Image: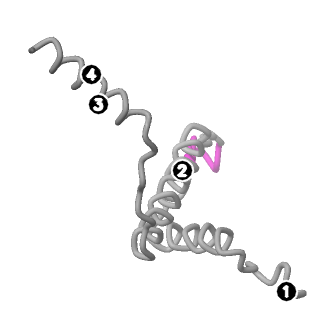
Amino acid sequence: MSDMTKQFEQFAQMFKAAMPQVKPNKNGYEIRTKVLDMAQNQIWQDYHAKWGMFEASMAKEGGELVTKVSLPEVPGTEKVLEAAEKFYNFVSGKPTNGKNDEK
């Protein structure tokens, strides 16, 4: 009998794997959270890409040797929210910055 039980369990597992899974739709808060997460990831990826291209220069000014290092600006909340708004507007089909206002 135990062999028969194992076969039924294996059949049930195979059948369960073949069935489509129903996933509920996300609510507005979940969608906005996901868009905000995408925007934050994009902004920080851009920052890290720019970090690899920092600029350093040395010049003689007066009688001294001056070293200047130019680093990218660390993104803050405003940059993330601006990017999130752009993502959200794109997904919802809204025009951004006056583009596509002819409807």
Q: Amino acid at mark 1?
A: Asp
Q: Quadrant of residue 50?
A: top right
Residue 7: image x %, image y %?
Answer: 24, 18
Q: Which mark is residue 12?
A: 3
Q: Is residue 46 magenta?
A: no
Q: Are marks 3 and 4 in contact (CB under 8 Å)?
A: yes
Q: Secondary structure at mark 3?
A: helix
Q: Secondary structure at mark 1?
A: loop
Of the two numbered discs 1 and 2 on the same chain, state the one appearing first in sequence: 2
Q: Secondary structure at mark 2?
A: helix
- Calculate the distance from the C-alpha at mark 4 to the C-alpha at mark 1: 59 Å
Of the two numbered discs 1 and 3 on the same chain, state the one appearing first in sequence: 3
* Quadrant housing the C terminus: bottom right
- Calculate the distance from the C-alpha at mark 2 to the C-alpha at mark 4: 50 Å
Q: Name the residue carrying label 1.
A: 101
Residue 51: image x %, image y %?
Answer: 54, 43
Q: Quadrant of residue 88?
A: bottom right
Residue at x 50% of width, y 74% of height: 78
In this rendered view, identify the residue nearer to me: 19 or 55.
19
Residue at x 54% of width, y 50% of height: 47
Q: Name the residue carrying label 4.
A: 10
Asked if residue 77 is positioned above or below residue 48 in the image, the reply reads below
